[in-house]
Image: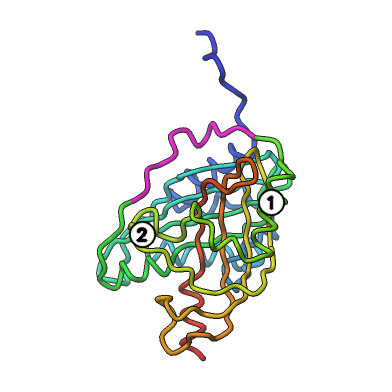
Amino acid sequence: MEALSGMHEPSPFVALMRIYCNDYTNRHDTSVCPLIMEPGYTLHMGVHDLVGRDENYTPAAMKQFTQFPGLCLTVNQIVTNGDRLVMRFSEHGASNRHDGRVAAWNGIGLYRWNGKKLLENFVEQDYFSRTVQLDGGDPLPVENPAIAPWDSPAEPENPAAEAFVRGLIESGDILDQPALLFDDEWISGAAGDRVIEPESAVINDIFSAGDHVAFHVAMSGRLRADSVLAGDNAGEKVLLHMGAVVRVEQDELVWGRGVRDRLGLKRRLAQG
Protein backbone atom coordinates (compact mmCIF):
# COMPACT_ATOMS: atom_id res chain seq x y z
CA MET A 1 0.00 0.00 0.00
CA GLU A 2 1.34 3.43 -0.92
CA ALA A 3 2.09 5.87 1.89
CA LEU A 4 -0.63 8.44 2.44
CA SER A 5 0.12 11.84 0.95
CA GLY A 6 1.46 14.33 3.46
CA MET A 7 2.46 11.73 6.08
CA HIS A 8 5.63 12.50 8.00
CA GLU A 9 8.09 10.56 10.09
CA PRO A 10 7.02 10.45 13.75
CA SER A 11 9.20 12.40 16.16
CA PRO A 12 11.42 10.15 18.34
CA PHE A 13 10.52 12.33 21.33
CA VAL A 14 6.82 11.75 20.65
CA ALA A 15 7.48 8.02 20.37
CA LEU A 16 9.07 8.09 23.83
CA MET A 17 6.07 9.96 25.24
CA ARG A 18 3.78 7.31 23.79
CA ILE A 19 5.53 4.77 26.01
CA TYR A 20 5.35 7.22 28.93
CA CYS A 21 1.58 7.64 28.54
CA ASN A 22 0.43 4.19 27.48
CA ASP A 23 2.91 1.75 29.00
CA TYR A 24 3.80 3.59 32.19
CA THR A 25 1.03 5.98 33.25
CA ASN A 26 -2.11 4.27 32.00
CA ARG A 27 -0.89 0.81 32.98
CA HIS A 28 0.46 2.09 36.33
CA ASP A 29 3.64 0.17 35.56
CA THR A 30 6.56 1.90 37.24
CA SER A 31 8.92 -0.82 36.00
CA VAL A 32 8.85 1.11 32.71
CA CYS A 33 10.38 4.20 34.33
CA PRO A 34 14.05 3.08 34.02
CA LEU A 35 13.46 2.52 30.31
CA ILE A 36 12.28 6.08 29.66
CA MET A 37 13.82 8.21 32.46
CA GLU A 38 17.39 8.84 33.53
CA PRO A 39 18.20 8.12 37.21
CA GLY A 40 18.38 11.85 37.93
CA TYR A 41 14.95 12.56 36.44
CA THR A 42 13.47 15.60 38.16
CA LEU A 43 9.87 16.79 38.35
CA HIS A 44 9.10 20.40 39.25
CA MET A 45 5.54 21.21 40.33
CA GLY A 46 4.60 24.31 42.30
CA VAL A 47 7.19 24.84 45.02
CA HIS A 48 8.15 21.15 44.98
CA ASP A 49 11.11 19.51 43.23
CA LEU A 50 11.16 15.71 43.12
CA VAL A 51 14.79 14.88 42.36
CA GLY A 52 15.69 11.31 41.48
CA ARG A 53 13.67 8.78 39.54
CA ASP A 54 13.85 5.97 42.08
CA GLU A 55 14.28 7.91 45.33
CA ASN A 56 11.45 10.43 44.99
CA TYR A 57 9.60 10.41 41.67
CA THR A 58 8.47 6.78 41.53
CA PRO A 59 7.21 6.68 45.16
CA ALA A 60 5.16 9.84 44.48
CA ALA A 61 3.67 8.27 41.36
CA MET A 62 2.76 5.14 43.31
CA LYS A 63 0.86 7.26 45.83
CA GLN A 64 -1.23 8.66 43.00
CA PHE A 65 -1.91 5.21 41.58
CA THR A 66 -2.88 3.97 45.05
CA GLN A 67 -5.36 6.81 45.59
CA PHE A 68 -6.73 6.50 42.03
CA PRO A 69 -6.47 2.77 41.19
CA GLY A 70 -8.18 3.35 37.85
CA LEU A 71 -6.38 6.59 37.01
CA CYS A 72 -6.40 7.42 33.29
CA LEU A 73 -4.36 9.94 31.33
CA THR A 74 -5.84 11.41 28.15
CA VAL A 75 -3.56 13.37 25.83
CA ASN A 76 -5.17 16.59 24.63
CA GLN A 77 -2.22 18.11 22.75
CA ILE A 78 1.44 17.54 22.00
CA VAL A 79 3.79 20.18 20.60
CA THR A 80 7.49 19.55 20.04
CA ASN A 81 10.54 20.98 18.29
CA GLY A 82 12.37 17.67 18.54
CA ASP A 83 14.53 18.70 21.50
CA ARG A 84 11.72 19.89 23.79
CA LEU A 85 8.10 18.80 24.15
CA VAL A 86 4.97 20.11 25.86
CA MET A 87 2.03 17.85 26.58
CA ARG A 88 -1.39 19.11 27.57
CA PHE A 89 -3.36 16.33 29.22
CA SER A 90 -6.31 15.36 31.37
CA GLU A 91 -6.20 12.92 34.27
CA HIS A 92 -9.37 11.35 35.58
CA GLY A 93 -10.47 8.62 37.92
CA ALA A 94 -12.17 7.65 41.18
CA SER A 95 -10.48 8.38 44.52
CA ASN A 96 -10.60 5.64 47.14
CA ARG A 97 -9.83 8.34 49.72
CA HIS A 98 -13.13 10.07 48.90
CA ASP A 99 -15.59 7.19 48.91
CA GLY A 100 -15.06 6.57 45.21
CA ARG A 101 -15.96 10.10 44.07
CA VAL A 102 -14.74 10.85 40.57
CA ALA A 103 -12.89 13.82 39.14
CA ALA A 104 -11.20 15.04 35.97
CA TRP A 105 -8.51 17.70 35.93
CA ASN A 106 -6.13 19.37 33.49
CA GLY A 107 -2.35 19.39 33.37
CA ILE A 108 0.47 20.85 31.29
CA GLY A 109 4.00 19.43 31.33
CA LEU A 110 7.17 20.74 29.66
CA TYR A 111 9.58 17.85 29.11
CA ARG A 112 13.32 17.77 28.51
CA TRP A 113 15.25 14.72 27.24
CA ASN A 114 18.77 13.83 26.12
CA GLY A 115 17.75 12.16 22.88
CA LYS A 116 17.15 8.83 24.59
CA LYS A 117 15.46 9.30 27.96
CA LEU A 118 13.62 11.97 29.94
CA LEU A 119 15.64 14.32 32.13
CA GLU A 120 13.18 16.83 33.54
CA ASN A 121 9.57 17.98 33.62
CA PHE A 122 8.10 21.33 34.67
CA VAL A 123 4.44 20.51 35.21
CA GLU A 124 1.30 21.92 36.80
CA GLN A 125 -1.94 20.06 37.41
CA ASP A 126 -5.22 21.65 38.45
CA TYR A 127 -5.44 19.97 41.83
CA PHE A 128 -7.59 22.85 43.10
CA SER A 129 -10.37 21.82 40.72
CA ARG A 130 -9.79 18.16 41.55
CA THR A 131 -10.24 18.91 45.25
CA VAL A 132 -13.49 20.80 44.62
CA GLN A 133 -14.85 17.84 42.67
CA LEU A 134 -13.77 15.24 45.21
CA ASP A 135 -15.21 17.29 48.09
CA GLY A 136 -18.68 16.97 46.60
CA GLY A 137 -18.74 19.18 43.53
CA ASP A 138 -19.98 17.93 40.20
CA PRO A 139 -17.27 16.09 38.22
CA LEU A 140 -16.03 17.90 35.14
CA PRO A 141 -16.12 16.23 31.73
CA VAL A 142 -12.88 15.03 30.20
CA GLU A 143 -11.66 17.20 27.35
CA ASN A 144 -11.67 15.53 23.95
CA PRO A 145 -8.44 13.67 23.22
CA ALA A 146 -6.04 14.84 20.55
CA ILE A 147 -7.00 13.11 17.31
CA ALA A 148 -3.48 11.92 16.45
CA PRO A 149 -1.09 12.80 19.29
CA TRP A 150 1.50 10.19 18.32
CA ASP A 151 1.79 11.68 14.84
CA SER A 152 2.64 15.18 16.10
CA PRO A 153 5.53 16.45 13.94
CA ALA A 154 8.60 18.24 15.21
CA GLU A 155 8.36 21.90 14.22
CA PRO A 156 11.22 24.41 14.08
CA GLU A 157 11.89 26.83 16.91
CA ASN A 158 10.44 30.32 16.53
CA PRO A 159 12.66 32.87 18.31
CA ALA A 160 10.37 35.80 17.43
CA ALA A 161 7.28 34.16 18.96
CA GLU A 162 9.30 33.11 22.00
CA ALA A 163 10.59 36.66 22.51
CA PHE A 164 7.06 38.06 22.20
CA VAL A 165 5.72 35.71 24.88
CA ARG A 166 8.72 36.36 27.12
CA GLY A 167 7.86 40.06 26.94
CA LEU A 168 4.25 39.41 27.97
CA ILE A 169 5.44 37.39 30.95
CA GLU A 170 8.01 39.92 32.11
CA SER A 171 5.53 42.80 31.85
CA GLY A 172 2.76 40.86 33.63
CA ASP A 173 0.47 41.29 30.62
CA ILE A 174 0.29 37.53 30.12
CA LEU A 175 -2.58 37.36 32.63
CA ASP A 176 -4.60 39.90 30.63
CA GLN A 177 -4.61 38.00 27.35
CA PRO A 178 -8.25 37.18 26.51
CA ALA A 179 -7.24 34.19 24.38
CA LEU A 180 -5.38 32.53 27.29
CA LEU A 181 -7.76 30.44 29.42
CA PHE A 182 -6.72 29.03 32.78
CA ASP A 183 -7.26 25.89 34.84
CA ASP A 184 -10.78 24.55 34.16
CA GLU A 185 -12.20 27.60 32.33
CA TRP A 186 -12.37 25.90 28.94
CA ILE A 187 -14.11 22.85 30.42
CA SER A 188 -16.36 24.23 33.16
CA GLY A 189 -17.18 27.58 31.59
CA ALA A 190 -16.37 29.21 34.94
CA ALA A 191 -15.55 32.91 34.98
CA GLY A 192 -11.85 33.61 34.83
CA ASP A 193 -9.92 34.27 38.05
CA ARG A 194 -6.70 36.27 37.59
CA VAL A 195 -5.76 35.41 41.22
CA ILE A 196 -2.95 37.97 41.47
CA GLU A 197 -1.81 41.36 40.27
CA PRO A 198 1.63 40.37 39.02
CA GLU A 199 4.71 42.33 40.05
CA SER A 200 7.52 40.10 38.79
CA ALA A 201 8.08 36.70 37.23
CA VAL A 202 10.81 34.08 37.13
CA ILE A 203 10.77 32.06 33.91
CA ASN A 204 11.71 28.50 34.83
CA ASP A 205 11.38 27.17 31.29
CA ILE A 206 10.34 28.44 27.86
CA PHE A 207 10.64 27.12 24.31
CA SER A 208 8.93 27.40 20.95
CA ALA A 209 7.85 25.05 18.18
CA GLY A 210 6.24 26.48 15.08
CA ASP A 211 3.72 29.09 16.15
CA HIS A 212 3.42 27.63 19.67
CA VAL A 213 5.31 28.71 22.79
CA ALA A 214 5.34 26.71 26.02
CA PHE A 215 6.47 28.14 29.33
CA HIS A 216 6.56 27.56 33.08
CA VAL A 217 6.81 30.57 35.39
CA ALA A 218 6.70 31.53 39.05
CA MET A 219 4.82 34.83 39.31
CA SER A 220 4.99 37.09 42.36
CA GLY A 221 2.25 39.60 43.05
CA ARG A 222 -0.57 40.77 45.25
CA LEU A 223 -3.55 38.51 45.84
CA ARG A 224 -6.63 40.08 44.27
CA ALA A 225 -9.66 40.71 46.46
CA ASP A 226 -11.95 39.21 43.81
CA SER A 227 -10.04 35.91 43.69
CA VAL A 228 -11.69 32.79 45.04
CA LEU A 229 -8.50 32.30 47.07
CA ALA A 230 -8.45 35.74 48.70
CA GLY A 231 -10.57 35.57 51.86
CA ASP A 232 -8.82 37.63 54.52
CA ASN A 233 -5.56 37.53 52.59
CA ALA A 234 -6.45 40.05 49.86
CA GLY A 235 -3.48 42.23 49.02
CA GLU A 236 -0.93 39.81 50.45
CA LYS A 237 2.18 39.22 48.36
CA VAL A 238 2.16 35.63 47.09
CA LEU A 239 3.90 33.28 44.66
CA LEU A 240 1.87 31.54 41.95
CA HIS A 241 3.29 28.88 39.60
CA MET A 242 1.90 28.40 36.12
CA GLY A 243 2.49 26.17 33.10
CA ALA A 244 1.05 27.12 29.72
CA VAL A 245 1.12 26.61 25.98
CA VAL A 246 0.04 29.42 23.65
CA ARG A 247 -0.14 30.14 19.93
CA VAL A 248 1.22 33.36 18.44
CA GLU A 249 0.32 34.87 15.08
CA GLN A 250 1.77 38.19 13.86
CA ASP A 251 2.72 39.39 17.34
CA GLU A 252 -0.64 38.48 18.82
CA LEU A 253 -1.50 35.74 21.28
CA VAL A 254 -4.46 34.10 19.55
CA TRP A 255 -4.95 30.96 21.67
CA GLY A 256 -3.69 29.57 24.94
CA ARG A 257 -4.22 27.18 27.82
CA GLY A 258 -2.64 27.56 31.26
CA VAL A 259 -2.72 25.62 34.53
CA ARG A 260 -1.81 27.27 37.85
CA ASP A 261 -0.93 25.84 41.25
CA ARG A 262 -3.96 27.32 43.02
CA LEU A 263 -4.15 24.49 45.54
CA GLY A 264 -0.54 24.95 46.59
CA LEU A 265 -1.14 28.68 47.05
CA LYS A 266 -4.32 28.02 49.04
CA ARG A 267 -2.45 25.68 51.38
CA ARG A 268 0.38 28.16 51.92
CA LEU A 269 -2.14 30.90 52.74
CA ALA A 270 -3.84 28.61 55.28
CA GLN A 271 -0.51 27.94 56.95
CA GLY A 272 0.08 31.64 57.33
Which portion, as a residue range, is magenta? Answer: 142-154
The amino acid type found where label 2 is placed reads: Pro
Along the line of sight, which residue is nearer the eye, 121 or 205?
205
**Is 85 in front, or is 118?**
85
Nearest to viewer (mark 1 / mark 2): 1
Give the image location of residue 259, x and y in percent.
Answer: 50, 61
Residue at the outermost top position: 1
Task: Tell whether position 145 is magenta.
Answer: yes
Is the stretch drawn in magenta largely helix, strand or loop? Answer: loop
Local SS, label 1: helix
Residue at x 25%, y 63% (from the top left corner) = 138
The three-letter amino acid code for the residue at tag 1 is Phe
Location of residue 106 in the rendering, given as x and y in whole percent from the top left corner: 44, 57
The residue at the point 68 percent across, 54 percent down is 206
Q: Position of residue 189 (x, y in %)?
A: 33, 57
Q: Is residue 13 left or right of residue 147?
A: right
